[in-house]
Image (tube, rainbow, N blue to C red):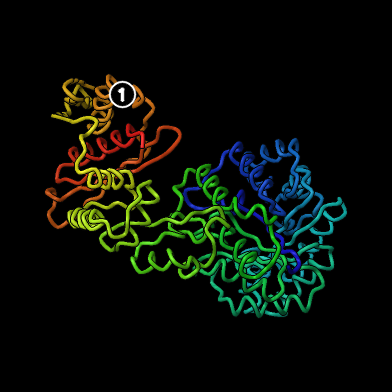
Amino acid sequence: MKPAIEIYDTTLRDGSQGEGINFSVADKLRIAERLDQFGVHYIEGGWPGSNPKDLEFFALAKRRRFRRARLAAFSMTRRKGIAVERDPSLRQLLEAETPVVTIVGKTWLLHVREVLRAKPDENLAMISDTIAFFKAHGRTVIYDAEHSFDGYADEPEYALATWRAAERAGADRVVLCDTNGGRLPREIAEVTALARRELAVPIGIHTHDDCGLGVANAIAAVEAGATQVQGTINGYGERTGNCNLTSAIPILHFKLGQRTVPAGSLPKLRDLSVFVDEIANVKPDGRQPWVGAAAFAHKGGMHVHAVERVVRSYEHIQPKAVGNSRRVLVSDMSGRSNLLAKARELGFHLAPDAPEVRAILGRVKELESQGYEFEAAEASLALLIRGILEHNPELLFTVEGYHASIRRDGANSICEAAVKVRVGDRRAHTVADGDGPVNALDGALRQGLARFFPRVGKVRLTDYKVRIIDTGTGTAAKTRVLIQSSDGAREWGTVGVSENIITASLQALVDSMEYALLRK
């Protein structure tokens, strides 16, 4: 293994600047603890001088003991025309008492002249004074050279002068930042290699994803000599985001042979990704490389057939190496290999030449032509397979009728549903109110079934999605309803399709309850 590449996580600061991302103080503490457990080298907690929330975070973080990571507080260089000792934001940074401070300064003369409205020499002094101040107070100082690549492209000598000023003042790391996210890997590699030659201090890289190259640019910098990678979990960040550490870390480890986080943490990568999404209240991106639900999902029949024989024929790495798992999808594109693999996954054992295989595959393709889809509705698929294998077994219950209505009561709408359920020769007729017709229908069905099957009380609807299938028919269009349910120990998805959204919802609800009640 080659020398270690430091991982600097800025999810709590740069990541929180992403649209729709908002962490509470408690959220930030939980994420910081999880990142420490995972084994990143640095955790940037925020900017103490920017808002009360970050001040509170650092006050509470002082009481925590981080076993692996070093906590960093972020700020900019001293303000123009003021001594560093009198700059209140830098005083707050010092009072955060973190072992590491990260200072951002200007590299690009355009920003120095037009944004700071400062003279070039004054900007160099601002960099030097600030770094020297924190070094004198015993801090490790990481210098983020903002707009490194844009600045170097315009005025290479001045850009280099800013990096040298940081080094002379005692910076422990100089981090080159592609702040606008507009540079290509070749440009990143050339400038990083130059900085590596000209400076003795270790070089880091901080990239944004505006061109979709955040990870690629970070990797290019490492190959050119950078030894620290800054980024965020799941790529959160300003505009289109930052370098995604859930991609960068496994690329560095598995593809480049570089030591980053402890090897034992790699199988926990997907869990970390999902954890941060949950804390941020963001739906996980199924198409994320490495950690997404679709990262090792196989749908094409040729692919599944090959993977069944030689796993690496269509997988670049074992899914479990990053805590993920292989998924086989069944759809109208599927062949026999998909169905056999999926059936095994669902607990059915089918002989390849069994006549039921053709019948199941034919039924799946027929239903998908009508608007059903089973990729996210595996419980409905399991019920379909069971029905054909057991030659239409008697259902545990039957819904003989239902009714849903909405009435106005002043300014409020009241939704009510009635359901007639038969179990054997016994019947139940229940009525329930709800926040909407589907919620009322779910309540009425659940009440009726609870008389015969008390364990349905544990089942909860956790997600509900509606998709209009044939939009050209207007309000007469077919509707596909996908429902996700849980009993606290497992989750499953079901599907219903109809021109009537209530009927489609009931189909998915009935499948969900039937699946929950089946012991096998």
The residue positioned 79% from the left and 66% from the top of the image is 166
Which quadrant: the N terminus?
Answer: bottom right
Q: What's under tag 1, amino acid-wise?
A: Phe
Write the residue at 18% across / 56% down.
Answer: 366
Residue at 65 percent of width and 48 percent of height:
35
Task: Locate residue 266, reporting x and y percent.
Answer: 62, 55
Give the residue at x 28% y 58%: 331
The part of the image, by quadrant, that contains residue 32 is top right
Residue 510 placement (x, y as % from top left): 24, 35
Above or below, 195 relative to 492: below
Residue 49, percent across and down?
68, 46
Q: Is residue 376 visible?
A: yes
The one nearer the camera, 473 or 265, is 265
- Along the viewing direction, whichever of 77 and 220 lies nearer the viewer: 220
Residue under label 1, please give it: 453
* Quadrant that contains the C terminus: top left
Report helix, strand or loop for mark 1.
loop
Q: Looking at the image, can residue 47 be seen? A: no
Q: Is residue 21 left or right of residue 96?
A: left
In the displayed structure, would residue 439 be above or below residue 132? Answer: above
Q: Give residue 443's quadrant in the image.
A: top left
User: Relative to residue 165, is residue 74 depicted above or below?
Assistant: above
